Image (cartoon, rainbow, N blue to C red):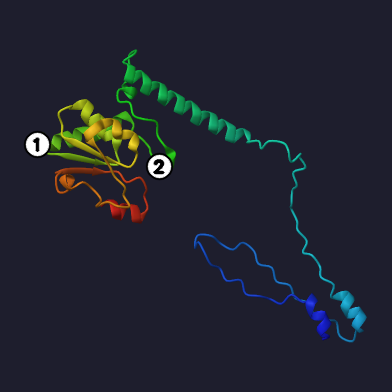
Amino acid sequence: MDKKLNKYLIPKSKHPTKGNPLLFQSSRFFFSFTAAPNTTRAAAAAKMEPQLPTIKNVFVNETDDDDPPALSSQALAALKEFLEEQRQSLANHETAENGEGTLEPESEVALVTEDWRLSQFWYDPETARTLSQEVLSLCSHSNYKVACIACPTLYAYLKKIDPNISVQLLEYDKRFEQYGSDFTFYDYNQPKDLPFELKHTYQVVIADPPYLSKECLEKVT
């Protein structure tokens, strides 16, 4: 074949799959051309003209580029629900701080608003009370010291039920510095980076790692 036609040939190439093993290569494109036998050079060149692949099922949004992006009705509903939950949580927290009104049982312990970026999910009252009673039963006959790792809800309920209990909250979110000396900054990536006086001090340790990954569980334990 004439060397001048080589520029129209796109040889098959290898496409190694690298990167995130959870991602899969969805498609591969291979282009090959075979010259027809017994044709003139001009005819072969005409047949060798590069062809663009046909793309199907492509939908073009013909809206003005200057139009602001719009959310679907489902996304708007989810966003509205989330904002309402945040508003209600903040209102309950302010009510508890100001001592105004009568708090419902679900709001008897007020925490800062959950931060989903930190994978924060506070316990419901029933769960928090059940865990608190278990911890208090362990400490009933001894002056045990308790450490709550990444479980601020449990800390708050323990102090609510028994203000005299010796409990320390180890938490990444520095908003809980409001608990004063009961708060210690804790990063599960550096689990041993703690004040010396806290090491080998606690007889009861409750940990609720923020993530369920193997790495996180191993570092916390």
Q: Residue furthest left?
A: 141
Label 2, secondary structure: give it: helix
Please indicate, yes or no, whether residue 127 appears anywhere in the rendered image. no
Disc number at residue 54?
none
The quarter of the picture where residue 218 lies is: bottom left
Upstream in the sequence, badge 2 or badge 1? 2
Foreground residue, 104 or 71? 71
* Rendered position, 37 above or below 106: below
Q: Secondary structure at mark 1?
A: loop
Q: Nearer the viewer, residue 78 or 163?
A: 163
Query: In the rendered view, would you say 68 is above or below 201?
Result: above
Q: Residues within 10 Å of mark 2 (few under 14, many from 20)?
A: few
Looking at the rendered structure, which numbered label has been put on residue 143?
1
Residue 43 lies, in percent from the top left, at 91, 79
Residue 117, percent from left and from top: 44, 41
Task: Locate residue 61 relative to residue 176 in the image: left or right.
Answer: right
Compared to residue 11, the image places residue 80 above or below, namely above
Instruction: Please say if 151 is above or below 59.
Output: above
Task: Provide residue 84's location: percent of width, then percent of height.
Answer: 49, 26
Residue positioned most to the top: 101
Kind of residue sitting beneath label 1: Asn
Q: Where, by quadrant of the figure, is residue 184 drawn?
A: top left
Type of the residue with mark 2? Leu
Q: Position of residue 102 (x, y in %)?
A: 32, 14
> What residue sits 29% from the left and 34% below the top?
177
Q: Residue at x 26, y 34 (%)?
A: 154
Q: Quadrant of the N terminus?
A: bottom right
The residue to which callout 2 is attached is 118
Can residue 7 be seen at all in this image of the molecule?
yes
49 or 81: nearer the viewer: 49
C-beta proximity under 8 Å, tags 2 and 1: no
Numbered marks: total = 2
